[in-house]
Amino acid sequence: MNHLLLLPQLRCTFRNPLPEKQVFLVAGGKTPDADWLKQAVGMAPLWCADHGIDACMKANLKPHHVVGDGDSATTEGWTWAKSLQIPVDEYPPEKDLTDLQLTLQKIGKAYGEASVILTGVWGGRFDHAFSNIFSLKGAADFGINGACAADEKEVLVFLKGSNNVHIETLIRPEVISLLPLSSECKGLSIDGVHWPLDHVILKNTLPYAISNNLTPSSNEFHVTVEDGWVGIYLYWK
């Protein structure tokens, strides 16, 4: 069974097993660093939502599948995808769901169950980032779990109760924050940091568990949540 989620800057070991299939998805937000993207993707199937194709073209990574309406992708990127005969599912710009939501649903249908690493999610408009994060959380409804949103500077690891995760930081982060992604996170604990917590209730109306950092002697920390969804956020300059 798979319990590991690996990124160039950290290693996450979950108590509960992750799906064996791991998929890497590039969305249309801030473009990740090309070298980071190459390392992070590894051997995982690579999918793109619309403008994400431009990040793949820049990193010279051929995706398995592209989904979107093409309104934010460059003409060069869209043409590049088609020239490589990559499957492209095109949609009209006027539609109910976003390109990312459509892509997540297609990944769920394609693999049945998968963990997704989502990049190209940060930067730009807050409403886009908000929709992207909660769409990824909601993708658990159709088989996607063990997910995170990440690039070379920001990582948000999703943890749903009842579960815990041990995170080894290969590059020491500037900030560690716990963000309640449900109305309440019960039985929430974190150790290995300057301000530890022990079985607290963290509400999304008072998200105070931010701007923490590792203890000077350690590059590892541990998070447990008994009920609810928590996002474990790390930031590097």
Image: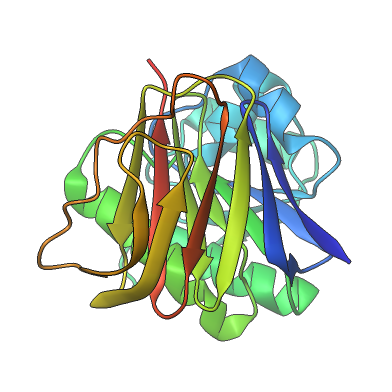
Where, quadrant-wise, is the N terminus in this rendering?
bottom right
Out of 40 and 28, give the one closest to the viewer. Answer: 40
**The C terminus sits in image quarter:** top left
Q: Nearer the viewer, residue 130 or 13?
A: 13
Compared across the picture, whether 49 is left or right of 196 comes to right
**Residue at the spot x=34%, y=55% of the render?**
197
> Is residue 81 visible to the viewer in this orientation of the structure?
yes
Left or right placement of residue 219 versus residue 69 in this view:
right
Please tell me which residue is depicted at 39% across the width and 77% down the height of the picture: 228
- Residue 177 placement (x, y as % from top left): 32, 43
Q: Position of residue 152 (x, y in %)?
A: 52, 24
Question: Image height check: is 232 above or below 101?
Answer: above
What residue is shown at x 76% (from left), y 79% (from top)? 112
Looking at the picture, how far across and down is residue 169, in whole percent? Answer: 59, 29
Asked which quadrant contains residue 125, the reply is top left
Q: Residue at x 35, y 47 (%)?
A: 196
- Where 51 falls versus 213 (above or below)? below
Whether 235 is drawn above or below 128: the answer is above
23 vs 193, nearest the viewer: 193
Give x and y (percent) for residue 172.
51, 20
Q: Is residue 78 left or right of residue 158?
A: right
Q: Quadrant of residue 189?
A: bottom left
Q: Is residue 96 visible?
A: no
Is 104 located above or below residue 60 in the figure?
Answer: below
Residue lying furthest left? 205
